[in-house]
Image (cartoon, helix red, strand yellow):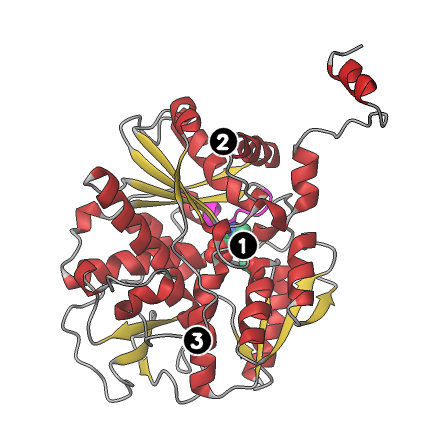
Amino acid sequence: MTDLTLARDEPTPDVAADGTWLACIECGAVHAPFDAPIYRCPDCSGLLEARYAEYPTFETFAEEGRGVWRYAASLPFESGVSLPEGDTPLHAVPRLEDEIGTRTLRIKHEGMNPTGSFKDRGMTVGVRVAAELGVGRLACASTGNTSAALAAYGGRGGMQTLVLLPAGKVAAGKVAQASLHGARILEVDGNFDACLDIVAELADRGEAYLLNSLNPFRLEGQKTIGFEILERYQADYGRYPDRIVLPVGNAGNTAALYKAFRELVASGALDAEDVPKLTGVQAAGAAPMVEAIEEGAADIERWESVETRATAIRIGNPVNARKALPGIRKTGGTAVAVADDEITDAQRALASEGVGVEPASAASVAGLRKLREAGVVESDEDVVCLTTGHLLKDPDAAAAAGTEPEPVPNDTDAVLDHLRGE
Ligand code: F0G
């Protein structure tokens, strides 16, 4: 298995820029980070990871300010185009905690970011790197949320944005965002994986700068989810959570959280045994990561045909699998698949406690419920579920999961009669 341990005193290679460089997770080759865009190792095509001369401790995070850039000590730059992002709530959900039966259950609601998903955290860093490289056009393939974030951050940074979407499979709110924030939108007759194949080729041909999670700097921004969870848990309970449950599509977040924890372990700020168990959840109709975990495989097998109501995670070829599989395994986590109806039930349960999320996000809670029922998650565990996108992203799914509006006449007495069931 790929060894992703970060060395504390790794010598800084000549290719480094200001203590930052890229390393291939497969062959270990090191590459200059900002000379020209690279997304995979030119030697072996392996995934790349950002490396630093120094890894952060909690003390290196700024006391002032909020959000992603407060964690600049763990990022390649001090600031970037910011709306601002991060610093999302960690909701208590007492009824759900009681029903599922864990020691504590908190919901890290990433839907509260400026464009309504966690993608903003990666985009603020990715767009900063794009500015450093001097590229003109930013591009991504997307199930929707990445396209919304790219359009907003790229637009604010004064850059052109291009997004490739699987035709007919992106929730209405996300297309509306990408459109109004000024992206050029191409609807591809194929699924997300096909869109990513095309946009990666456009990037390789120098036509655009790729800001999917294949871009290692996107994941640097997303690491801050992990830092925020650990800091908040420590402040509220004097300990760290045992487990973090999250939806998995391209497995970027899984890889990013694992990187956050490895950095803290490398700096000596976190004991390896205190790293939360990363637990991934996929929709049953798009579950190659679950399959790889169950089979003990070193990589995923691409699923050509995928389907789920949780369109954000309708992905058959998770590009970050080689980073995320070790993250799940080495933290003692697992992966589980859930049915669409289980996702909708969880979406309703969260909504009844005031936490409005899109279907993919609710997969985390559906997965936790299933693993708790199976006894894989124990009753004495402190658990955080990540909810990745806001309810309003997918208004059609929300309306379908909610109650029907009741038509009434334009008359108070008639309204009262209706309410009394007469
Ligand atoms: N949840 C939501 C709401 C998402 O939009 C995504 C990914 C995921 C979970 C999965 O995260 O890829 O890090 O495992 N959406 C991408 C997009 C693919 O294009 O917006 P992951």
Viewer-side label of 1, 3: 1
- Camera-side mark, 2 or 3: 2
Residue at which label 1 appears: 116
Which image quarter holds the C terminus? top right
Residue marked by disc 2 = 353
Crowding around mark 2 (Cα neighbors within 10 Å: few <14, some 14 to 19, many 20+) is: some
Q: Amino acid at mark 2?
A: Glu
Classed neighbour count for the residue bearing mark 3: other residues with Cα under 10 Å, few (<14), some (14–19), many (≥20): few
Q: Is residue 141 above or below residue 227?
A: below
Asked whether the viewer can see residue 109, the reply is yes
Q: Compare marks 1 and 2 and give the one earlier in the sequence.
A: 1
Compare residues 64 and 280 and report the one nearer the observer: 64
Residue at image x 43%, y 79%?
A: 129
Look at the numbered discs 2 and 3 and tell me whether their residues touch, using CB distance below 8 Å: no
Q: Which residues are magenta?
A: 285-291
Asked whether 150 or 419 is in front, the reply is 419
Question: Which residue in the structure is indicated by mark 3?
Answer: 45
x then y, percent, for residue 251: 45, 56
